[in-house]
Amino acid sequence: MCGIVAYIGERDAQPILLDALGRLEYRGYDSSGIATINGAGLQVKKKSGRIKDLLELVERKPSTGTIGISHTRWATHGEANDANAHPHVDQSGKIALVHNGVIDNYQTIKRLLREKGHTFCTKTDSEVLAHLVGYYYEKGHEPDYRERLESALRQALNEIQGTYGIALIHEDIPDFILGARRGSPLVLGIGNGEQFLASDTLALGAYTKKVVYLQDFQIATLTKDEFHVKPLFSNKTMKLKIQKLDYEPGSAELGDFPHFMLKEIFEQPTAIKNAFRGRISIEEASAKLGGLNLTPEQLREIDRIFAVACGTALHAAMVGENIIENLANIPMEWDYASEFRYRNCPLERNTLFFAISQSGETIDTLGGLREAKRKGFRCLGICNNVGSTIARESDGGVYMHAGPEIGVAATKSFVSQVTIFSLIGLLLGRMRYLSASAGQKIIHALEELPNQIETILGQSAKIRKVAEKYANSKSMLFMGRQANYPIALEGALKMKEITYIHAEGYPSSELKHGVIALVEPNVPSIVITPRDTLYEKNVNSIEEIKARNGSVIALTNEGDPDIENLCDDVLYVPKTLETFQPILNVVPLQLLSYHTAVILGRDVDKPRNLAKSVTVE
């Protein structure tokens, strides 16, 4: 989850590293640090807290030099303090290393190095890796210092178990950077007389448009004029595919919004348009998804769909299950990627897999994808990052084109993923049971969604007033039925993530099976109650809550005045096809959690203990 940036060139490294690192703070914000090399040797400065704390430190004690590495941390091993912040140095104090990932066997290596006289200053696994590289460097005999450092890194990486994305420099080699990856993203940025390494392309867009995505078990060597990529187990330079970075200036800027989360909530109409733009055929009343890399014959052979994901993406898959089964009449299942990768799941032969991840780097989702491929299934990805690992390792898929999502709490990625499942359901449905007229109605409903969300966004001030009323609640219950059950889960997740109020999501029908014991005046229930086939059932649940003095916020369709007399507060959304109603229903819940967090003074975009992209298990 950590952010890495490295630079070598002719410009002063510090301002470039700090600027690029600031763009990656959403990946980790427990601590940060920077290391540069100049005529005075290796300079390391690091600080717990946010990047602004590091900026204050380097303003007092500037780092100079045209080569450097930097890091923003999300703690795994060792608390968030100055000592445990990256970069870490080896025993000699000449090698500095930044690391994203987890070294599983670091305790064993640490014990062996201690027996050889090494002393450690931190509780991190990353410092052990720095020492191990330094140990092999001191043992090396290669006359060329670059070759010796590269060889030391290879030997160290061959000993460790775990995941890594790393960059390192050596005080005695002030014109050379090494990088490597296994299971944690790392991208090489190519400039004119300068080179970059980063854990996310978002750090590079302002500096270069040419990138190379490193793959697992690859090592990158950088000078200001050259770069090479080699396999970990070979010294042979590889041929590389240089890709153009799709970067729009300002896409990752706040603009007039106070928080990225609010900005991204308001970007959802555009995100939905981007998800279906160019993918709808009015003439065929169907969807066009060439990226699936499947022929019509192969699509018709699908007997079951299985999706793996985590967090908000899993909730999108749960909504997708309802969409696929309703539109295409194909059974669909989903599972937590973290569980699927370790269990023996019986699967039918003609099962199509989907791996869903905004970043395309979620470690558990990637593990689920690889497990499915290992078993011989065709696997497709739904992700937002064209150069991500899931995008590269999938047999095909659908890109979201949602633009950068910086807020840790996912919003626009959710509606984009559900929209893509709607397109998949339309495509498969038209191949099976859906008539052309039904397909046309579905397309019309999809095209109306952006305008309908704009209507909901216009109610933001009203939703804030509701948030003010319930901001001091000790807990909240979210309830819905069928495809709105995952919306209840998503609403509860957002409330937990950014307000720290305990919240749980349940099917409304489960109220009497234990949940009702939690009902009391200071525990409001948010009941998703659209005017659908289960409307009366949901109203019965509301009646049961009110009979026990519980507060109720109902979320229903416009034009339902009766429910106002029953509930304490009502949030209205436009009506659409029942299959797509969850896409609209999630937006007020996003705004409710956002406004509640702001009222409580929470750090909306950087909630405690969380980071945007989970790249460690």
Image (cartoon, rainbow, N blue to C red):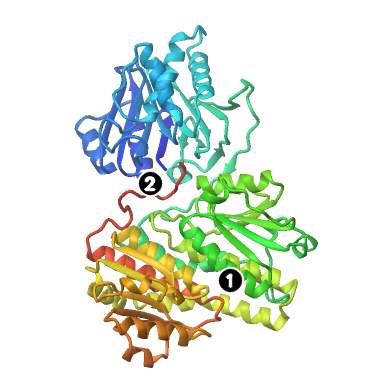
Q: Quadrant of residue 53?
A: top left
Number of numbered labels in the structure image: 2
Furthest residue in direction right, as rendered: 297
Report whether 575 appears left or right of 519. Answer: right
Q: For the point 50% across and 37% down, which residue is it? A: 186
- Specify which label sits upstream in the sequence, 1 or 2: 2
Asked if one can make out residue 195 in the rendered structure from this viewpoint, the answer is no
x%, y% of residue 436? 72, 80
Report whether 395 appears left or right of 497. Answer: right
Tag in front: 1 or 2: 1
Q: Amino acid at mark 2?
A: Arg
Please rate how many residues cluster around mark 2, counting C-alpha atoms within 10 Å: few if below 14, some from 14 to 19, many from 20.
some
Q: For the point 47% across and 43% down, which residue is it? A: 615
Mark 2 — residue? Answer: 23
Please rate how many residues cluster around mark 1, counting C-alpha atoms within 10 Å: few if below 14, some from 14 to 19, many from 20.
many
Q: For the point 26% across and 75% down, which residue is it? A: 520
x%, y% of residue 80? 28, 38
Q: Secondary structure at mark 2?
A: loop
Q: Nearer the viewer, residue 562 or 108?
A: 108
Which label is found at residue 45?
Answer: none
Q: Amino acid at mark 1?
A: Asn
Q: Secondary structure at mark 1?
A: helix
Asked if one can make out residue 307 in the rendered structure from this viewpoint, the answer is yes
* Quarter of the figure with the N terminus: top left
Q: Nearer the viewer, residue 263 or 463?
A: 463
Q: Quadrant of residue 56?
A: top left
Mark 1 — residue? Answer: 322
x%, y% of residue 403? 48, 57
Q: CA distance from mark 1 to mark 2?
A: 37 Å
x%, y% of residue 110? 39, 21
